Image (cartoon, rainbow, N blue to C red):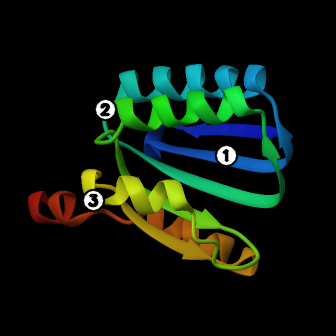
Amino acid sequence: MLNYQESDNAKLVEITISGHVSTAEFDRIAKKLEAFIKRHGEVKVLEVIEDFDGMDARAFWHDIRFSLRHLHDFGRCAVVCQAKLIDLWSELVAPFSSCEQRHFKPEEIEAARDWLREPDGSEADSA
């Protein structure tokens, strides 16, 4: 299951993942996220992984295609999960993406939100 929340003023999307993710559910959330990117350009994402049981094979393929289309549309990405998961896809995409990523423990979710709301280097320089 995917839960999705937007914060327009912070250009921030929060996605919570739990259980099994279906293709229809992934596509629904991807469509919302693409509209958010279209409105704001580069965005920040908080991904909270609670008890992820996997996803449909087709959803995984759609995730790969989505990620490739949006390599440069994410400024920062915070992943909140029980243990520091090494995501193979992130490792493969990292050399091609300009997204700054950090991992946080569940009890650090507010620190993750704070980090995402901090101005990045370019925003701080223009202030």
State which tag comes first along the sequence, 1 or 3.
1
The amino acid pointed to by label 3 is Pro
Q: Rounded to the nearest whole Å, what is the CA distance between mark 1 and mark 3?
A: 23 Å
Is disc 3 placed on a helix, strand or loop? helix
Q: Which residue is mark 1?
A: 15
State which tag comes first along the sequence, 3 or 2.
2
Q: Which mark is residue 47?
A: none
CB atoms of marks 1 and 3 within 8 Å: no
Is disc 2 placed on a helix, strand or loop? loop
Mark 3 is surrounded, within 10 Å at the Cα level, by few (under 14), some (14 to 19) or many (20 or more) other residues, namely few
Q: Position of residue 124 (x, y in %)?
A: 19, 65
Q: Rounded to the nearest whole Å, what is the CA distance between mark 3 and mark 2?
A: 21 Å
Identify whether 111 is placed above or below 33: below
Residue at image location 65% in from the left, 21% down from the top: 27
Q: Which mark is residue 41?
A: 2
State which tag comes first along the sequence, 2 or 1.
1
Q: Position of residue 37 (x, y in %)?
A: 41, 29
Identify whether 32 is placed above or below 55: above
Q: Which residue is mark 3?
A: 95
> Which quarter shows the N terminus?
top right
Q: Give the residue furthest to the left.
A: 126
Identify whether 27 is placed above or below 5: above
The amino acid pointed to by label 1 is Ile
Residue at image location 43% in from the left, 66% down from the top: 101
The amino acid pointed to by label 2 is Gly
Identify whether 60 is placed above or below 29: below
Is disc 1 placed on a helix, strand or loop? strand
Residue at image location 15% in from the left, 59% down from the top: 122
Residue at image location 76% in from the left, 19% down from the top: 24
Residue 84 quadrant: bottom right
Q: Position of residue 59 (x, y in %)?
A: 68, 30
